[in-house]
Image (spheres, coloured by chain):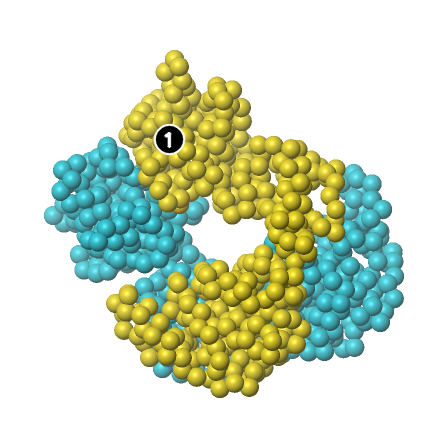
Chain colours: A yellow, B cyan
Amino acid sequence: LKGEIITIGSELVSGLVVDENSAYIAQRLVSVGIEPFYLTSVGDDEGAIEDALLRAVGRVGVVITSGGLGPTPDDITSRTVAKALGKRLVLMPEALEYIRRRYEKRGIDVPGTAQRQALMPYGSQVLANPIGTAPGYYIPHAGKHLFFVPGVPEEARAIVEQEILPVITEEIPREFYVARRVLKIFGLTESQVYEKVKDISYDPSKVSLGFLPVFPENHLSITARSHHGENQAFEVLEQVEESMRAVLGEVIFGHDDETMEEVVAGLLLSKGVTLAVAESLTGGLLAQRLTTVPGSSLYFDRGIIGYSNTAKSDHLCVDPLLISEFGAVSAPVAEAMARGIKEVSGTDVGVSMTGIAGPSGGSEQKPVGTVYIALCYDAEEGVAVKSRHYQFFGDRHRIRLITSEMALEWIRRYLLAEDPADMVH
Amino acid sequence: LKGEIITIGSELVSGLVVDENSAYIAQRLVSVGIEPFYLTSVGDDEGAIEDALLRAVGRVGVVITSGGLGPTPDDITSRTVAKALGKRLVLMPEALEYIRRRYEKRGIDVPGTAQRQALMPYGSQVLANPIGTAPGYYIPHAGKHLFFVPGVPEEARAIVEQEILPVITEEIPREFYVARRVLKIFGLTESQVYEKVKDISYDPSKVSLGFLPVFPENHLSITARSHHGENQAFEVLEQVEESMRAVLGEVIFGHDDETMEEVVAGLLLSKGVTLAVAESLTGGLLAQRLTTVPGSSLYFDRGIIGYSNTAKSDHLCVDPLLISEFGAVSAPVAEAMARGIKEVSGTDVGVSMTGIAGPSGGSEQKPVGTVYIALCYDAEEGVAVKSRHYQFFGDRHRIRLITSEMALEWIRRYLLAEDPADMVH
């Protein structure tokens, strides 16, 4: 069965906003055996919405529409859908009650305009919105399955996951099964990944590969299809995945939705290792990434963002003479920061980064992108510290991002190493 | 005149890749007086490409298509376009020469497959690709203007800028001019914004408004159109903007591409105020946002992420008795953190946040989302500190994000206040 996605909003067609909903919803449709066919964006324009909807209904069995369900007058999706499908627009008491409760929970009176969000085409089934006030709805129509969600990405995603996918799985006989794995790689370029995997053989009628650079990572997707069942698709997938893992090895840090910080957090928790960080150019980005993971207080003790030199001395016990001799951006200072943060926090590991994010602050000897990373850990003869120099490229945002990623990679490698002393990176 | 954008690629319709070309091209079309109507994505599928192209040609005057011009067998755009328009596919010597030179420049032999990229529908005009090897092309067809560019975003953008916009400006009489402003708001819900601005009168034939929630902010776009010239469009815009600013006041923190952190950074720099921050639940997010701005070392001294209680005592001189009496998440501790960070850093302002980001760690008295923010500053009688309790809602990510945004808003309000003592928030 084929599907289409229609995203509605003048901010989309006029280019003010990049449409992130279509790709997300498309991926989720594939996962339940629906093949996306067209993705269309139209403005808050009655004629265009009606035309796009009716064409999609004429072409495919599943249509998911996002946008135009808000409380303001430019939100005309429900009215237009009702007209296009020849249905009345009715006030859904269930939706109204739902909206009322959402506002009540926050202690806000229901604004008059919010009631508009309870108006839906006759025959709609309300889809709960676990995040926002605008509920979605489902209209079974002439053997087709039409779903409507708000345009706010988090809300659209939540309704797709919690409400729409279960309906599709229950209502639509499965035609094909897909197994998909995204291998996440840090440390190789796209071309290097391709060179490593290009001789692996697979049946292209069953498997497709995708190469996707997501700075500073490279993601490699493997999609396996089978008409015979989920297990068959998984078997095909596993074979290819195994070959990929054999040639790529430990540059694969995770898979699917796992982020680098989640992988590192998982390792820290399972090994019972505690950590503190000392940052400069990344300005808190490493600590922020390490603490996005729920339960991070079990392994993360503190972070010091020593932007000024005195901050480095005050909290990390970095000798001011070291800074004046080697400069704040140097291996000795990075190492002193790592030692200092480990000592002051009493954690198992201390990690530090110092460098020049740019655009200004670079010199001939230490150009923008010069970065030192250091890691301090307990060794037999006391504490040991390792550091390394990197030259990164790109704008301020990219240099900060790749620096934090490399620091996470250091922690990952340290936690995976048989003997930290052998940890080369 | 209306325009459409068609992006081609199976990675788009299957959701592996977010389509960034459409929004970019749409924005550029608007800037030269072409109104985008539909944005469509289709896979590398002959039937779908042909259908999408012919429908677009039937509906609008300008069509820009991206994708499917690469050297591999799944790149079928040119062949399909030729078929759809009833034109022969011909080898363009100009394009071949162009491709040859691109490879030569890199010292690589032209691969046999690359010659495919010189095959174009009869009557095409080659559009130079300043970045990659795949040239684009322009087909004037039955009074319509059809443009084709590769899917790689950087290449598509370069051809649009350097080749397509000049052709449009020269070939198509200008029908309208657009002036656009996005007002960025923090502190009101979408409905509240709407309630405030709904009685402002404007000519809907000349002005359109867009309401866009981008958590935790709300963005309000004003688009003014004029048939008479750029200045006229700006005049219309300015009138509406002035009315909006009059009713919304200082909840508007910035406009267009400005971020909250850039606005705060600009104020800190222009007023010569220095700052240090003490974080807990946000884990470095506030510091990270404050330091994304180039030159942040001029106002940002340090950040302490005191995740553990000892870290709060070690670096911020928070009395452990205070923590045991009131709890780490409390107004007295938030205030002590703000005082501590200001004192230890010697900056003009100290900002602190303490709270519960969840999902665990909440209690009946202090549920997930409980947050205290405090700001410490120099007053006549020494240092003064203000704090406030908030109850935020949502998942860990949202609670951390809105907390950091609210702290930035505190700094902004402090810097704008005539007398900080009056600063109410």
Q: Residue B293 location in percent, x, y?
A: 43, 48
Q: Could you tell me which residue is drawn at 42 percent across and 70 percent down?
A: A135
Left-right relation of A346 to B5: left
Q: Could you tell me which residue is drawn at 33 percent across and 79 percent down?
A: A112
Q: Nearer the viewer, residue B215 or B397?
A: B397
Q: Could you tell me which residue is drawn at 79 percent across and 66 percent down?
A: B81
Q: Quadrant of residue B87?
A: bottom right
- For the C terminus of chain A, the quadrant is top right
Q: Is residue B240 above or below residue B376?
A: below
Secondary structure of residue under mark 1: loop
- For the N terminus of chain A, the quadrant is bottom right
Q: Is residue A410 above or below residue A20?
A: above
Q: Could you tell me which residue is drawn at 53 percent across and 71 percent down?
A: A147
Q: Mark 1 Cα within 10 Å, few/some/many (few <14, many 20+)? A: few
**To which chain does the residue with label 1 belong?**
A
Q: Nearer the viewer, residue B337 or B159?
A: B337
Left-right relation of A35 to B320: right
Residue B207 can be seen, yes or no? no
Q: Residue A49 location in percent, x, y?
A: 57, 77
What residue is disc 1 on?
A272
